[in-house]
Image (tube, rainbow, N blue to C red):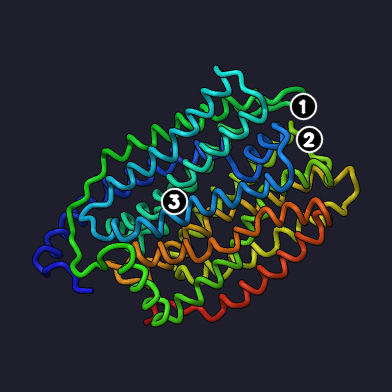
Amino acid sequence: MNPAPSSDRDRAQRQIDHALVRNFWVLAVNQIAMRIGWVFRTETVIIPGFVDHLGASGALRGLLPVIGRIGASLPQFLLAPALARLSRQKGAYFLGNCLQGLPWVLIAALLLFVPLSSGAMLACFMALYTLSAAGYGLCTLSFGTLQGKLIPPRQRGRLLASFGLVGGTSAIVGAALLVPLFLTDQRADYGPIFALCGGLFVVATFILLGIREPPVRHRDVPAGLRGFIRDSFRVLGQDRNFRLLIWVVTLMYLTLLLFPHYTIFGLRRVGVTPHGFVTLIIAQNGVNAAGSFLFGNLADRRGNRATLRLMTVVAAAVPLLAVLISRLPASLAPHAYPLVYACLGFTPVSQRIVTNYALEIAPQERHPQYLGILSVMQAFPIFASPLVGWAIDRASFEPVFLCFSGLMFVGALLSAWLVEPREL
């Protein structure tokens, strides 16, 4: 794939260098607002608790990761060819932010102002959650592409550290002050919580108006989805390290299939109460903030490969840790269970590290393609998520958790063979 003419590329690079500080902080503040909003819609606590409040079954809870993963993955792959042909990516990122945030405004409006039955509300929620997941997929692809264009490789970890630390810390404060006002042992009022989420996502969207992005066109981008798919198979056939990365990430993100079940496991096996949800949220976001800072800087110094290897081990240990804590005395287990959510706090950090590693091993003109392929390939196991919920209903939580832990440790082992692009 031939790049843009050298003179155009050099001119664009000078403009990117000139606006580096501005773009760095616009993207950081956008992500900070998104991170604070995200705490009010966490897939590990708030959303499973909400659908359980509406009377959803284990199998229906199992649909949540399917919706989330397909929504996040399929748009990335389908839209990657169009995004690769764009001279600017900020418009796509703005649109993705809109699609991700507005559904939560609508969900909050339904809860606050429209009296619906539990079944009708659950149907509306699932539909709007699907739309938000699709917006998240577009956000992930366009943010990765925009970051790959505007932020140098050795400053991407610093960007992660900046918005992760500030956003995560602010999210903890927001959760500690606001969630207990609406979620108690006596009542569960999710309308204001989702309104906060949607409002912060809208704020994050308009922050993006400050981005300065010069146009850069790439020649010979595969025309149409069919040509893009053929070219993607060629990339998979030629890039052995990328194929290995797909296996590692796919096994590591089996953890997403368990996300809707950790809260219910805590309620039924450990003795966690709805009033204790805020402790779980704080633990998760506290580690997310600290982990973003530590691992973002580590990735800049030691490389994304080393950081990714460590994160695969952490992900594999989470289900095992949950089972071990449930075996503690009843007086200790509820107090120790936030450790599970602390480890889950590394998951968003690992997703950023995976993106940054993929950006490093891919030529710049193929950034959307690599991210799209990676996203859609790792989505295939998610179709088993309802089966996971069914298996938990039939065989209980513990056997399923231990099986998943074993599979994820296989992914951790495979990560030892990933190459370090900075040594090539």
Q: Amino acid at mark 1?
A: Asp
At which x and y percent is residue 348?
53, 53
Residues at marks 2 and 3, CA–CA distance in whole angstroms: 33 Å
Task: Say whether residue 47 is left or right of residue 319.
Answer: left
> Badge 2 is on which residue?
273
Q: Are marks 3 and 1 in contact (CB under 8 Å)?
A: no
> Badge 3 is on which residue?
137
Q: Secondary structure at mark 2?
A: loop
Q: Are marks 1 and 2 in contact (CB under 8 Å)?
A: yes
Q: Which quadrant of the figure has residue 178?
A: top right
Neighbour tally class for label 3: few under 14, some 14-19, many 20 plus, Cα within 10 Å: many
Vertical arrangement, residue 160 with respect to residue 47, above or below: below
> Badge 1 is on which residue?
185
- The residue at the point 61 percent across, 47 percent down is 64
Residues at marks 3 and 1, CA–CA distance in whole angstroms: 35 Å
Is residue 173 among what the camera can see? no
Q: Nearer the viewer, residue 224 or 246?
A: 224
Question: Across the whole image, how many numbered discs are drawn on residues?
Answer: 3
In which quadrant will I find the C terminus? bottom left
At which x and y percent is residue 126?
57, 39
Q: Amino acid at mark 2?
A: Thr
